Image (spheres, rainbow, N blue to C red):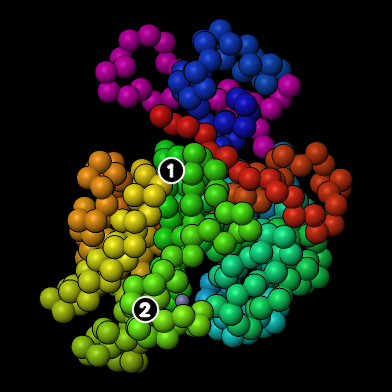
């Protein structure tokens, strides 16, 4: 438990470990002494003292000794593929992305991921055998029984088995996740969600999905389809959605919809591109805050259902900034139960468009650290190992 905690936190003092685990000082001291003797933990320097902690000896900082090897994180967005190679501590060694139409070109996107993977390994002069785990996030519902994409939402990917296809291109087993799930985990481990055990991450891009971190664990639902809020019905006679239904949330709020609204107001650069970063004028502000209010109306129901501590808005719309957030906040305050609304913090993703790739890296690192040995893994074995966050409360 102590070693797992240290690997998640990156570094700790003995006092931190006592607070986080609830163990006594003597128990923590014994565990740490054993780990230092085994060469799994190093004692390096001293921790900076916080306000009001002037007395006593300075605390020694404990740092986990990470095994050799690297991991790969792959993020398929709706319009990009991003790949990162990192060490087992989650430090990125190389990262690259390409823009392409992922939704409508599954084969091209899978090929691009394979090429980026090889290019990055070449760039850091590493061998594919050094990569102990690879995890990919895909922007569609993944059936966890068959590991296939199983919804018309991502029409060119239906019945595609990304784990198998990527495994062939990377020359090694690949673990598959939903993109909002890896985004949630990226923010929980490295971004705005650090320190929270109950959070909702809303990936708001061309589509909308939610990654749920509940009680420190990624919650995927019975078959892996939890959190598809983009297809919450707002108006039964509304616009047709790509899912075949009408009036879904993402027919009203998505990066594409907001761009269309901004374009109609003349919000574009000299190349005709519409950026979602706020141009400081009243009309742009109104469009983004209204998108936030509509999104917040659905988020308020999720707050009533799940009572999260934090809602993190990521994806392309996450850069919409304060007007979008204030709209979400306004609807949560209006429609969620007061006690529920009171405890939830609404934030934008700290990692920006990198939440997903960093979540994939984090899951890959957890799997690598739990694996008995790199060569003992079964090919394409997508084990149901759910990563856990440690409590900081
Ligand atoms: Zn829909």
Q: Which mark is residue 236?
A: 2
Compared to residue 175, the image places residue 102 above or below, namely: below
Q: Are marks 2 and 1 in contact (CB under 8 Å)?
A: no
At horizontal 41% and vertical 69% (from top left) the residue drawn is 232
Taking the magenta stretch, the answer to whether it contains residue 61 is yes
Q: Is residue 309 visible?
A: yes
Quadrant in the picture for residue 137: bottom right
At horizontal 29% and vertical 91% (from top left) the residue drawn is 270
Where is residue 259? Give x, y as percent. Answer: 33, 82
Compared to residue 116, the image places residue 337 above or below, namely: above
Q: Quarter of the image containing the N terminus?
A: top right
Q: In terms of secondary structure, what is the magenta stretch mainly?
A: loop
321 left or right of 114?
left
At horizontal 62% and vertical 50% (from top left) the residue drawn is 363
Q: Quarter of the image containing the C terminus?
A: top left
Q: Which mark is residue 102?
A: none
Viewer-proximal residue, 59 or 278?
A: 278
Kindly identify which residue carries mark 1: 198
Quadrant in the picture for residue 266: bottom left
191 left or right of 362?
left
Where is residue 373? Give x, y as percent. Answer: 82, 42
Q: Is residue 358 visible?
A: no
SS at mark 1 in the image = loop
- Badge 2 crowding class, 10 Å Cα cut-off, few under 14, some 14 to 19, many 20 or more, is few
Quadrant in the picture for residue 285: bottom left
How many numbered callouts? 2
SS at mark 2 in the image = loop
Magenta range: 38-66
Q: Residue furthest front?
A: 236
Compared to residue 68, the image places residue 297 above or below, namely: below
Q: CA distance from mark 2 to mark 1?
A: 31 Å
């Amino acid at each position: 438990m102590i070693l797992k905690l240290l690997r998640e936190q990156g570094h700790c003092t003995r006092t931190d470990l006592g607070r986080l685990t609830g163990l006594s000082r003597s128990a923590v001291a014994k565990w740490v002494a054993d780990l230092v003797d085994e060469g799994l933990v190093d004692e390096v320097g001293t921790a900076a003292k916080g306000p009001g902690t002037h007395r006593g000896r300075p605390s020694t900082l404990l740092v986990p000794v990470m095994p050799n090897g690297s991991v790969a994180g792959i993020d398929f967005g709706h319009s990009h593929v991003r790949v990162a190679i990192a060490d087992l501590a989650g430090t990125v060694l190389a990262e690259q992305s390409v823009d392409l139409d992922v939704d409508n070109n599954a084969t091209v996107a899978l090929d691009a991921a394979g090429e980026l993977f090889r290019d990055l390994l070449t760039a850091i002069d590493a061998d594919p055998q050094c990569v102990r785990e690879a995890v990919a996030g895909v922007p569609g519902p993944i059936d966890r029984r068959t590991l296939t994409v199983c919804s018309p939402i991502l029409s060119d990917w239906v019945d595609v088995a990304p784990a198998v296809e990527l495994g062939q291109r990377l020359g090694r087993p690949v673990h598959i996740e939903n993109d909002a799930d890896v985004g949630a985990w990226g923010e929980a481990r490295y971004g705005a969600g650090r320190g929270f055990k109950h959070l909702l991450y809303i990936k708001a891009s061309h589509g909308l999905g939610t990654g749920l971190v509940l009680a420190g664990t990624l919650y995927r639902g019975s078959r892996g389809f939890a959190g598809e809020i983009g297809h919450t019905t707002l108006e039964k006679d509304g616009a047709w959605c790509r899912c075949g239904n009408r009036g879904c949330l993402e027919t009203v709020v998505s990066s594409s919809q907001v761009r269309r609204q901004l374009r109609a107001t003349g919000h574009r650069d000299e190349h005709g591109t519409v950026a979602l970063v706020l141009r400081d004028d009243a009309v742009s502000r109104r469009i983004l805050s209204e998108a936030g209010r509509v999104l917040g109306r659905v988020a308020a129901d999720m707050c009533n259902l799940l009572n999260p501590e934090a809602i993190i808005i990521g994806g392309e719309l996450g850069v919409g900034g304060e007007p979008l957030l204030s709209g979400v906040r306004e609807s949560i305050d209006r429609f969620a139960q007061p006690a529920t609304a009171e405890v939830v913090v609404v934030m934008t993703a700290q990692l920006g468009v990198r939440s997903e790739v960093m979540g994939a890296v984090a899951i890959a690192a957890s799997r690598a650290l739990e694996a008995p040995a790199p060569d003992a893994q079964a090919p394409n074995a997508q084990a149901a190992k759910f990563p856990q966050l440690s409590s900081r409360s």
